[in-house]
Amino acid sequence: MAMAIAHHRESSSGSLTRHLDSTGKYVRYTSEQVEALERVYAECPKPSSLRRQQLIRECPILSNIEPKQIKVWFQNRRCREKQRKEASRLQTVNRKLNAMNKLLMEENDRLQKQVSQLVCENGFMRQQLQTVPAATTDASCDSVVTTPQPSKTDANNPAGLLSIAEETLAEFLSKATGTAVDWVQMPGMKPGPDSVGIFAISQSCGGVAARACGLVSLEPAKIAEILKDRPSWFRDCRSLEVFTMFPAGNGGTIELVYTQVYAPTTLAPARDFWTLRYTITLENGSLVVCERSLSGSGAGPSPAAAAQFVRAEMLPSGYLIRPCEGGGSIIHIVDHLNLEAWNVPEVLRPLYESSKVVAQNMTIAALRYVRQIAQETSGEVVYGLGRQPAVLRTFSQRLSRGFNDLVNGFNDNGWSLINCEGAEDVVLAVNSTKNFGTTSNPANSLTYPGGVLCAKASMLLQNVPPAVLVRFLREHRSEWADFNIDAYSAATLKANSYAYPGMRPTRFTGSQIIMPLGHTIEHEELLEVIRLEGHPMVQEDTFVSRDIHLLQICSGINENAVGACSELIFAPIDEMFPDDAPLLPSGFRIIPLDSRTSDAKGALTTQRTLDLTSSLEFPFESSMQDNVMNMAQQYVRSVISSVQRVAMAISPSGGSPSLGPKLSPGSPEALTLAHWICKSYSLQLGTELISSDSLESDSLLKNLWNHQDAILCCSLKSLPVFMFANQAGLDMLETTLVALQDITLDKIFDEAGRKALCSDFPKLMQQGFAYLPGGICASTMGRHVSYEQAIAWKVLEADETTVHCLAFSFINWSFV
């Protein structure tokens, strides 16, 4: 009994903490001991055996505890930390699911109302069809004469503007939460706890419309402030100017806004909008920002300011922001536009008549941007190379804006055309007044005595996946770029050193290193620094770095993003570029133009056409203008020619044997190679790579393609290059089947991996296989990949004597 009382006192004491050791017995720790262990855990959650023994020696209060018991304490502590993080994650997911459930219930209610409305309309139409209308109408009856009433929606007085604002509010709310528009789910955008939101596009209505709703962990006022600043998140918005702002009598605010929007291509004019924007807080606490175009007379912008623009119409659109009980807000976004597609070439009209394009460029972009700001505010975003997220966003915006300026070439920016030799040729424009830099630090601005030359061209490509094309351009710059031209552009960043010719002779290896800076929340846009390796050809320049650095954004690499364009925009920078470094953007924009045509059987098929716009900038001195013009024109033509060659190779209908995917999944060659790989693995190692119940051609290739380990095949040449990889292998190398053939075996292994492969190579060729130790390899993007073990074996042909290639399997790989 006394022993039981003593045990109870010890267990209830606040100065003791009990933990289970590996034998199942409780080990009691004092609060001082726990505090000492917690300090070590904060520095190193997983200390080594030597570190634990050192801890016992340095802390006398731990001298009565065995090293094994301390090891168990750290294991239990890591387990508790993992459980805590998992509980926090589950709570976050639960909140998202609750909010998503609420949105889906609202969507379900809206659909039920729409069904009821359609049923009523159907019944009414049936009744009308069954009712025999009156045969004739007495012509002698008095005709009804309606006298036009004065409009209450006159845009020339405040009362009329308030009436327009109230009508806009009612129409916008009917689109955001009602049945005013026949909404259908955006293709490829399924709602879920990890999705950004729920997206829909209009099925049949005047103009093109898109809608989004999602949960954001920001307050309504902050969200409204972000979304009203349209140039910050809408990359195609050139400017937004508020001409008039006055309070409404009901507590709201009315603004008259003039907006200019860039044209996406050189083949179409830019658009502008003259709109009324109405901001008001509803009775239920929701904040609404709605907007619509003003027509007819009114104090719009001067004709001179809108000379290069086509006036487009914004139908009632806006943002409905509702606060949530647990914090954050639910946003409903509606964009409804009439982009006046009649005045663009017919081939481009699908771009102006597609709700998917509006959804990607405006609606989804707005919600993603707000989510990005919310994550940065909460500290979830990892900084790139010590840069703040706001700085990285500014770099992306400046690159995109600079490229849009080149494509559009507005006169009020100082651009003037030099020549235009045809729609298919290179267009040259010059800007003699352009000053590169930022107003925050004039010392970093660059002014060129001659000016800046822009060479741009657009062309149409048939049936080419834009995501595949932009990835190829990003990963294989040497296929289309001239590094000496890059060196010329990079030299412009240094004072009095950009004269062409006359630069220091440099030899470029053609290799590039991609260093990530940042990315958006869904990785739809990447910001990175590109280093092009250069070596001096003059002895006295041996110790001077000749590398070229480019700041680059790449977007639209997701093949499942319907209606999204792909971009690759870059600008030369200094190696240690400041936050306000001057930028001279150049690049590519690839726009999908989907059109439907009927085949011989009457079925509808989709033919994809791409508008590829390329614009490049070249600074020059006055005396060198003609030389730079000739150089720029020839260079852009060579770039366009290279891109056309690449596009033909990667097109499903293309047939270039040097660049096309020789072993695309499903081809007879791939089926044969898959059979050889599995049969050789079984023959050499005595075990099965793929289960024996799936050894028939198609299923074997499918299982090999979806195998969890990265499986790659390389040729047996003096410089082995890869010729096949399964999906995991392509993911590990961050490449495509098209670009795989340009990757050599030595490029992916680090120094230790190359030494291990060289030492085991004789064994591999003698016995047919070899086990390589775990290590680190590199993807084509420069990211490090760790793997637990690699297996190499000879792939034999059908006669089981001829070696066709070498195969590698990287087991349990992951990005570091």
Image: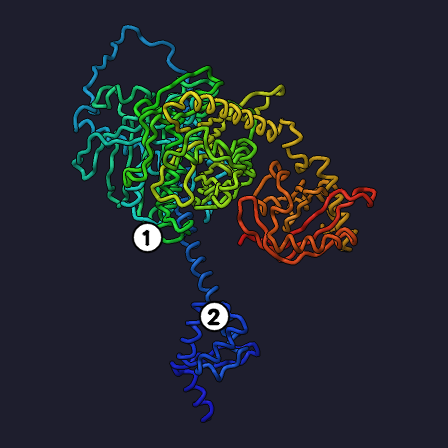
Give amino acid for label 1.
Answer: Gly
What crowding class fits label 1: few (fewer than 14 Cα within 10 Å), some (14-19), or many (20 or more)? few
Give amino acid for label 2.
Answer: Arg
Give the residue displayed 61% in from the left and 46% down from the top. Answer: 747
Question: In the rendered view, would you say 72 is above or below 432?
Answer: below
What crowding class fits label 2: few (fewer than 14 Cα within 10 Å), some (14-19), or many (20 or more)? some
Give the residue displayed 45% in from the left and 43% down from the top. Answer: 528
What residue would you read off at disc 1? Answer: 327
Check whether the beta carbons of the residues at disc 2 and disc 1 lie within 8 A of each other: no
Q: Position of residue 201 (x, y in %)?
A: 43, 33
Judge from the rendering whether residue 727 lies leftward or rightward of residue 80; answer left or right: right
| Of 233 and 804, the residue lying toward us | 804
Judge from the rendering whether residue 815 lies leftward or rightward of residue 387; answer left or right: right
Mark sitting earlier along the chain (2/1):
2
Q: Position of residue 273 (x, y in %)?
A: 30, 26
Q: Quadrant of residue 231?
A: top left
Q: Position of residue 105 (x, y in %)?
A: 41, 45
| Of 696 and 602, the residue lying toward us | 696
Q: Quadrant of residue 722?
A: top right
SS label for mark 2: helix
Q: Disc number at residue 77?
A: 2
Question: In the rendered view, would you say 531 is above or below 238?
Answer: below
SS label for mark 1: loop
Q: Position of residue 322 (x, y in %)?
A: 31, 45
Judge from the rendering whether residue 599 lies leftward or rightward of residue 501; answer left or right: right
Q: Quick check: can you spot residue 782?
A: yes
Question: In the rendered view, would you say 660 is above or below 728?
Answer: above
Judge from the rendering whether residue 612 lies leftward or rightward of residue 625; answer left or right: right
Q: Quick check: can you spot residue 119?
A: no
CA distance separating discs 2 and 1: 32 Å
